[in-house]
């Protein structure tokens, strides 16, 4: 069955340089650097990536960072809490805009 | 849960396992990868470690066990074979004796063997691969921590995770709680404590179809999570990749993960890890005295290639040093990522 998202396509990610090499090389160098141990551990970065993957709703990233988080020793509870962080920020981002709505309501109301 | 052998499962037959591993769908032959790295045929460096499998009998039935060990396995090393091992130790420059199983402590001659090894090799490193729960399994094992301490044995114990859910999923219900108790008993006699000289190392195996992450990162997390709330200390964490044989292979096939897992192992092939594989400095002795390049080859019944020296009674150092190490597709498990060995990552 043809679908827009094919799990097999994740394996092709590293080949995007086929159409534009220099930018791809720069991106992957940067990507590799970002996920190295730093002020944050590689494990913490993996959980952030997992949360962001859910926020941007990227199925490739969700698969990749679920496995990566497990490889780095995270458990299901920690991974679900990371997703809740993403959900809270997404939900909060909608709700905080309600202040604009409230301002407008008050502005035009008697 | 019964062993695969007791179930008459096809995967308890090593020929069946090898046919599966060798099928073209499994991917590029391991020998080709070694050739690319300039390592084929794979040769030993120097035999430093003698690993003795004291038997397949175990009080646990772990879901990933490459030995297919369990209470229903009765194959154990006899004292006669142990005597043959001691003869080799008397005459060879072996610096580490690694006792494994099953649960090696269940062999009735375990303590006799340890004492005999210590007499022959007062300075050698003796390792026992203790599954922890054996210490609590029967009052006759409660003094094992003291026994280990008396003979300055290094303890290596599997603990796949610092929570009950994941540990019990791999090793059986209630194993985590008993393991924590056993670790506390080991800590109490000095194991894992700073400056005690008593080494307690833990082994992490992923509880599923994924590879272990960085050994350093996982060790830091384990140290933190075992210190609080349990107050447990240990020396090092060894990350070990699950090799696609026996019960783990059965799990991979049953869960539909076999092909993806093999693909992942092959993709993660690391030439540096290949250069440091444990079979280059180890000989593994089976419960019946036959010699193998490693514990995994032992379970696949792939004896060392030098026909003149395939049994401990016929030990021929020169032949063993010049042998070609027997390889197959399962070897990708030891060369993936940071590598894997009985002593953890290798690259």
Image (cartoon, coloured by chain):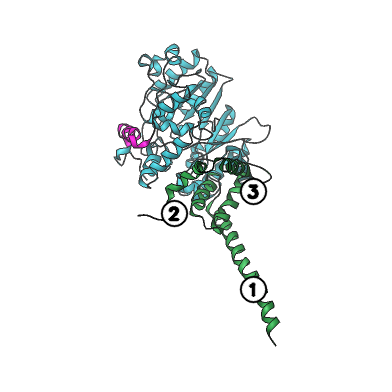
Chain colours: A green, B cyan
Q: Between tags 1 and 3, which lies in front?
A: 1
Q: Total number of numbered labels? A: 3
Residue B332 in the image, given as x and y percentages of width and height: 44, 32
> Can the viewer see residue B295 in this picture?
yes
Residue B345 in the image, given as x and y percentages of width and height: 54, 33
* Looking at the image, residue B128 lies above or below residue B7: above
Q: Separation of disc 3 and disc 2 at Cα?
A: 43 Å
Give the quadrant of residue B64: top left
Neighbourhood count class around disc 1 (C-alpha, 10 Å): few under 14, some 14–19, many 20 upward = few
Position of B328 with respect to B39 (left or right) is left
Q: Nearer the viewer, residue B286 or B78?
A: B286
| Range drawn in magenta | B12-27
Q: Nearer the viewer, residue B226 or B347?
A: B347
Q: Separation of disc 2 and disc 1 at Cα?
A: 34 Å
Query: Does the magenta run of residues contain B22?
Result: yes
The disc placed on residue A5 is 2
Mark 3 touching mark 2, by CB under 8 A?
Answer: no
The disc placed on residue A98 is 1
Residue B152 in the image, given as x and y percentages of width and height: 59, 27
Same chain check for tags 2 and 1: yes
Q: Which residue is mark 3?
A: B228
Q: Separation of disc 1 and disc 3 at Cα?
A: 42 Å
* Element at label 3: loop
Task: Name the dominant secondary structure of the magenta segment.
Answer: helix
Residue drawn at x 42%, y 51% as measured from the top left: A6
Position of B228 with respect to B27 (left or right) is right
* Element at label 1: helix
Q: Nearer the viewer, residue B119 or B49?
A: B49
């Amino acid at each position: 069955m043809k679908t827009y998202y094919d799990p097999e396509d994740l394996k092709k990610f590293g080949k995007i340089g086929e159409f534009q090499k220099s930018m791809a090389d720069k991106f992957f160098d940067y990507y590799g650097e970002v996920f190295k141990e730093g002020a944050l551990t590689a494990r913490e970065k993996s959980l952030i990536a997992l949360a962001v993957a859910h926020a941007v709703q990227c199925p490739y990233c969700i698969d990749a960072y679920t496995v990566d988080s497990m490889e780095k020793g995270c458990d299901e509870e920690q991974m679900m809490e990371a997703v809740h962080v993403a959900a809270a920020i997404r939900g909060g981002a909608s709700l905080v805009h309600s202040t604009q709505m409230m301002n407008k309501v008050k502005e035009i109301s008697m | 849960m019964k062993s695969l052998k007791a179930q008459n499962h096809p995967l308890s037959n090593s020929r069946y396992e090898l046919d599966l591993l060798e099928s073209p769908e499994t991917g590029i032959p391991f020998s080709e990868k070694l050739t690319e790295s300039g390592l084929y045929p794979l040769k030993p460096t120097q035999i430093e470690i003698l690993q003795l499998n004291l038997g397949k009998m175990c009080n646990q039935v772990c879901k990933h066990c490459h030995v297919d060990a369990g209470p229903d396995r009765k194959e154990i090393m006899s004292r006669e074979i142990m005597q043959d091992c001691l003869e080799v130790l008397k005459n060879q420059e072996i610096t580490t004796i690694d006792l494994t199983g099953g649960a090696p402590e269940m062999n009735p001659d375990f303590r006799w063997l340890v004492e005999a090894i210590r007499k022959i090799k007062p300075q050698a490193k003796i390792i026992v691969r203790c599954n922890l729960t054996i210490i609590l399994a029967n009052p006759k094992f409660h003094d094992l921590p003291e026994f280990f301490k008396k003979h300055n044995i290094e303890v290596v114990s599997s603990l796949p995770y610092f929570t009950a859910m994941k540990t019990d999923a791999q090793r059986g219900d209630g194993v985590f709680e008993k393991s924590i108790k056993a670790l506390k008993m080991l800590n109490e006699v000095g194991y894992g404590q700073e400056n005690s000289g008593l080494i307690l190392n833990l082994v992490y195996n992923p509880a599923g179809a994924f590879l272990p992450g960085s050994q350093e990162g996982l060790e830091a997390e384990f140290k933190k999570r075992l210190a609080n709330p349990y107050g447990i200390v240990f020396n090092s964490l060894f990350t070990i990749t699950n090799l696609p044989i026996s019960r783990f292979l059965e799990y991979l096939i049953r869960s539909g993960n076999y092909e993806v897992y093999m693909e992942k192992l092959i993709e993660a092939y690391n030439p540096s890890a290949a250069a440091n594989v444990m079979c280059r400095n180890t000989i593994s002795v089976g419960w019946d005295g036959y010699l193998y390049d490693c514990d995994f080859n032992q379970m696949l019944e792939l004896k060392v290639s030098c026909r003149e020296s395939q049994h401990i009674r016929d030990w021929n150092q020169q032949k063993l040093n010049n042998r070609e190490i027997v390889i197959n597709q399962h070897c990708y498990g030891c060369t993936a990522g940071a590598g894997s060995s009985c002593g953890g990552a290798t690259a």
